[in-house]
Image: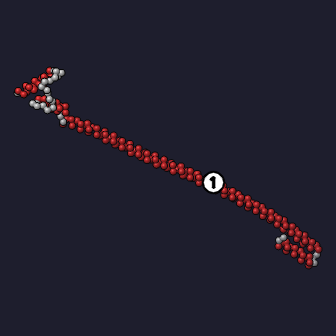
Amino acid sequence: MGRTSMALLAAILVLNASGCRDNENKRLAEMAERNLDRQAQQETRNTELQHQVAEGTKRLVEADASARETIVEIHRDVQAERQGLGAQRDRMEDERRQIAETRNRESIIAESIKAIGLLIACLVPLLIALQILRRSDTPDESAAVAELLLSDMVADRPTIVRIIDAPPKSFGDGASRITDRRDADQFT
C-alpha cells in the first residue's frame, strides 16, 4: 500500500477514537474503503500499464534492432551497387578514352594519307617534266653506242671489234666485205 492509503487508514482510526457519531464514522469508513478500493484499482491499472509499457518498449527495441539490421543490409547492398556502378563507369571511361585515341589516331592517319597523296600528285608532273628535260639535254645512248662502234670499226686498229683476217665460212659475204673495206682503208 501507498502512503495515501496509510494516511487514510490513520485518519479513520483517529476519527473512530475521537468519539464521533456512528453515522459519520460509518460514512467516513465507507469513504475510506472506497478510496482504498480506488487506489487498489489505480495501482492495478498502473501495474498493467507498466507491464504494457515494458512489453511495448521490448517490442520497440526488437523492432528497432530489426530495422537496424535491415538498414545495415540495405547499406551493404547500396555499397555493392555503388562499387559495381563505379567499376562499370571506369570501364566505360577506359572505352571512351580508347575510342577517342582511335578517332584521333585515325584522323591523323587520314590527314597524313591526304598530305602524302597531295604531295605525290604535285610531284608527278614535276617528275615527268624533269624526265622530259633530261632526255632532251642528253644525246640518245643508243646513238652514242652506234657512233662509238662505227668509229672503232673504221679505225686502223679497232679496240672493241676485232675482225679476223680469214673469216670463217659461216659469216659469208658480210665478213669479207668488212675485211675488204679495212684493206682498202689501209691503202688510202
Q: Secondary structure at mark 1?
A: helix
Residue 93: % across, % down: 49, 49
Is residue 183 shown left or right of residue 96? left
Let me know if residue 39 appears in the view.
yes
Q: Residues within 10 Å of mark 1 (few under 14, many from 20)?
A: few
* Up/down of 37 relative to 129, above or below: below
Residue 30: % across, % down: 90, 70
Farthest residue toward the bottom?
Answer: 18
Foreground: 122 or 84? 84
Foreground: 138 or 132? 138
* Up/down of 172 relative to 130, above or below: above
Where on the picture, by quarter, is residue 79?
A: bottom right
Farthest residue toward the left?
Answer: 188
Where on the picture, by quarter, is residue 40?
A: bottom right
Is residue 59 shown left or right of residue 86? right
Residue 22: % across, % down: 94, 74
Q: Residue at x 24, y 36 (%)?
A: 131
Query: What residue would you read off at disc 1?
Result: 74
Foreground: 4 or 48? 48
Q: How many marks?
A: 1
**Quadrant housing the N terminus:** bottom right
* Up/down of 111 relative to 160, above or below: below
Q: Residue at x 38, y 42 (%)?
A: 110
Q: Residue at x 94, y 75 (%)?
A: 21
Q: Residue at x 69, y 56 (%)?
A: 66
Residue 120: % across, % down: 31, 40
